[in-house]
Every structure is written in C-alpha cells, then in structure tokens.
Image: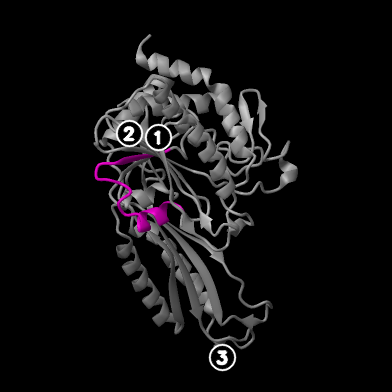
C-alpha cells in the first residue's frame, strides 16, 4: 500500500480515538479570567498527559505569568517532532481556551459533556479550536506510527488566551521568546475556513478603532444660541468620516468586500432629557483597511477632518486610538500555500482559493514578524454558538490534509 494511503487508513481507523480526545478536552472548561474562568491550566494537563503517552517527541511548556488565575500562570505547549534535517519547520498552531457556553438553556445537553450524534460532535470548543487541535495531533501520530521522519521538523503549538486577545498566548511568546521561530519557518492555523475547505486565508485588513469625544457647551434647548451643540458637531463628523469610504476607494479582490471600510458604530448616551443641548458627544469608528494602505495615511486624513469640524463648530475634539493593528499578507506563492492546495485537492477533491478577510486572527501577529502564516480548516463555522458542533468527517479529513503537508 502506498505510504499516503497507509497514513490515511491509519487516520480513518483512529476516528474513535480522536473522538475520545475530543471528549477529554471538552470536559475541561478552559475559560479566560475575563470571562469568569480559571484559564487553561487543567486542560493543558490533560493534553500534555495524552501527548506524553504517545511518545512523539519533546514537549516544552512556556508559561505566561497571570496573577488572576489560581496557578499564577497561563500555559503554552510545544511538541517538537524532528525532521531529517535542521531545515525550517512547519508549525501548526491551535488554541486551548474556549468561550463560555452563553445561555445554557439553549443547549440540548451539557456543553462540557461531549455528545456524538449523526456524524457530529457537540460541545463547547469541539470546533473552536479542538477540531484543529485533535487533527494536528493525529496527523503527527500517523507519521509516528509509520516511523516517518519528514524532511523538515514539525512543531505543534497549543496556545492560551486566543479568545481574549492573545496577551498570554502567541503575543507573549513572540515578545518573550524571540528565538522560538527560526528563519523560514511557516505556520498553519486551523481556526477558520469554509464548509467546502476551499478558503485559504493569507491576508487580513488592518484594524483601526477610534474613539471621538466632542466637547461643546451645554445649555437649555430653548436657548440654543447660548450653547454649542456637541451632538450636531459630532453628527457632522460622523458623516465626514463615513465619507472616507469614497476617499480611500482602491480595491483588492483578494478581499470581500474588496475595499477598505469605515463604519461609525458605538454611540454613548449624552444628556438624559430632551430639553437640554448636549455639551458632550462620544462615538466610535471601526476601520478595516487594505494592507496596501498604511493606517497612518488614514489617520492623517482623519486629523484633517477633525480639524475642519473643530474650526467650523467651535468645539474641542479628542481622538483616542483604541486599536491599531497592521500586518503584511502572506504571499499567494508561498510554499505552504502551494503545499496546502495540493493536500486539499488530494483529500477533498476541491481547489483551494486564497482570500483575505476583514476580521482579525492570530495569524496577524505572526505575519508582522515576517513568518508565512496561513489560516485554513474545513468548518461549518459553529464557533461561539449554542450547540457548537464539529463534523467528524472534517476532523478526520483535516488530519489527512495536515499529514499530507507534513510529508512535504
């Protein structure tokens, strides 16, 4: 039997073991302290124990200090599987933390007790991100079972804190363990995708979140000439900022929509009564900027608009940057992209297509460090929903894709 077929057969025969690992992980809530949880420690113990039993390679644990959790630390695990050479490694990065179940009454069963029904696994975290986690582990087990050493090493990275910002996960590792990734390393992040497996995310729009506070002069609404209406000035500013959609109209059809977007969103309450002219107005702007357009160029234009509004209405305007994230795209010609396309075609019989997205992922942190990073999985996208599920065929199929990539 050809090697690839033997590996695929091993994975198919391992379906029940994959389900059992899902059951073990699902039973241990790994919720961030921001969401009322105690972090990933107990789940990391379960996962580390399973990995040690398999004897695949060296396991490292890099903890991020966090006084809010009982252990005072948030765990990040790395499993090193050596290759034939010291060439650049393939990393597969998944996260151990999950979001809370939300309204438990909307679940058909206990969110932390795995349910198997009609080819699906139900439970909190089974798709986000345990499908990718379990697939990566068993893909590597398939190689180990055959005694295969790939040309370059494979490293499985299981991080903390993806759901609440990654300060104790990948961002901590990149800051405090600068030599973790070597030149030429590439990373697959199986944490987003499409139901047919064709979507290969290689780029993200930059994120720019801004808060505006307009200060005028409060007065009685029957005597508006005695005040300065901050709400009016703020409303004019909102419309001008919304007009940035026409100012920065360049297109990149890697993305949907193919343009930068500028959306006024949150609005804070001003005065509680009808007959008072508000002296303060506060709102927020969500900008998703194409990578080819620098955020600073956008900020410079916004400062011009703010100055015009300030002078026209006689108000003061404070602008606060809430988030300012930019990362370069991974090239569509990167070796990992080509390898992934071949594997997707082999396993699922479809053609992978590179795309960019407007939302942010952990991939951006890696790309900013010059690491080729691709986000891909075959998912039904039930993350964060009640009755979250993962298709068993996706879990097994994605493991085949990962094993195919590991073979080179």
Q: Is residue 264 visible to the viewer in this orientation of the structure? A: yes
339 or 253, nearer to the observer: 339
Question: Mark 2–mark 1 contact, CB under 8 Å?
Answer: yes
Q: Name the quadrant containing residue 109.
A: top right
Residue bearing the label numbered 3: 226
Q: Secondary structure at mark 1?
A: loop
Residue bearing the label numbered 2: 82
* Numbered label attached to residue 57: 1
C-alpha distance separating marks 3 and 1: 75 Å
> Residue visible at 42% across and 36% down?
376
Residue 186 in magenta?
Answer: yes
Crowdedness near tag 3: few (<14), some (14–19) or many (≥20) residues, C-alpha within 10 Å: few
Query: Between disc 3 and disc 1, whose residue precedes?
Result: 1
Relative to 1, residue 146 above or below: below
Relative to 183, residue 24 above or below: above
C-alpha distance separating marks 2 and 1: 8 Å
Residue 49 drawn at (x, y percent): 53, 38
Residue 328 drawn at (x, y percent): 30, 50
> Residue visible at 39% across and 53% down?
173
274 or 134, nearer to the observer: 134
Query: Between disc 2 and disc 1, whose residue precedes?
Result: 1
Q: Quadrant of the C terminus?
A: top left
Q: Nearer the viewer, mark 2 or mark 3?
A: 2
């Amino acid at each position: 039997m050809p090697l690839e077929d033997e590996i695929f057969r091993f994975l198919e025969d391992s379906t029940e073991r994959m389900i059992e690992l899902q059951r073990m992980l699902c039973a241990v809530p790994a919720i961030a302290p921001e969401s009322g949880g105690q972090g990933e420690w107990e789940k990391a113990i379960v996962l580390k124990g399973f990995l040690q039993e398999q004897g695949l390679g060296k396991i490292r644990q890099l903890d991020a200090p966090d006084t809010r959790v009982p252990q005072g630390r948030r765990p990040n695990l790395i499993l090193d599987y050596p290759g034939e050479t010291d060439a650049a490694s393939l990393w597969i990065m998944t996260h151990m933390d999950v979001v809370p179940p939300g309204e438990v009454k909307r679940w058909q069963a206990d969110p932390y007790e795995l349910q198997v029904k009609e080819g699906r696994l139900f439970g909190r975290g089974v798709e986000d991100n345990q499908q990718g986690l379990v697939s990566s582990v068993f893909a590597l087990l398939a190689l180990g079972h055959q005694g295969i050493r790939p040309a370059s090493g494979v490293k499985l990275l299981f991080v903390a804190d993806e759901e609440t910002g990654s300060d104790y996960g990948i961002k901590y590792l990149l800051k405090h363990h600068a030599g973790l990734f070597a030149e030429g390393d590439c990373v697959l992040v199986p944490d987003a995708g499409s139901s047919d497996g064709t979507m290969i995310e290689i780029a993200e729009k930059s994120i720019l979140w801004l808060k505006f506070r307009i200060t005028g002069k409060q007065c009685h609404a029957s005597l508006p000439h005695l005040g300065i209406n901050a709400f009016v000035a703020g409303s004019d500013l909102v419309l001008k900022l919304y007009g940035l959609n026409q100012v920065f109209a360049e297109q990149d059809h890697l993305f949907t929509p193919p343009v930068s977007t500028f959306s006024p969103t949150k609005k804070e309450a001003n005065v509680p009564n009808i007959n008072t002219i508000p002296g303060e107005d506060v709102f927020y702007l969500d900008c998703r900027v194409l990578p080819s357009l620098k955020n600073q160029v956008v900020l410079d234009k916004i400062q011009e608009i703010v100055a015009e509004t300030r002078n026209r209405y006689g108000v003061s305007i404070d602008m606060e940057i809430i988030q300012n994230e930019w990362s370069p795209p991974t090239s569509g010609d990167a070796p990992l992209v080509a390898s992934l396309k071949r594997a997707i075609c082999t396993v699922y019989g479809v053609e992978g297509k590179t795309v960019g997205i407007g939302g942010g992922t952990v991939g951006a942190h890696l790309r900013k460090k010059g690491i080729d990073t691709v986000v891909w999985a075959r998912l039904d996208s039930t993350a964060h929903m009640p009755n979250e599920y993962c298709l068993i065929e996706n879990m097994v199929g994605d493991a085949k894709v990962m094993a195919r990539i590991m073979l080179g």
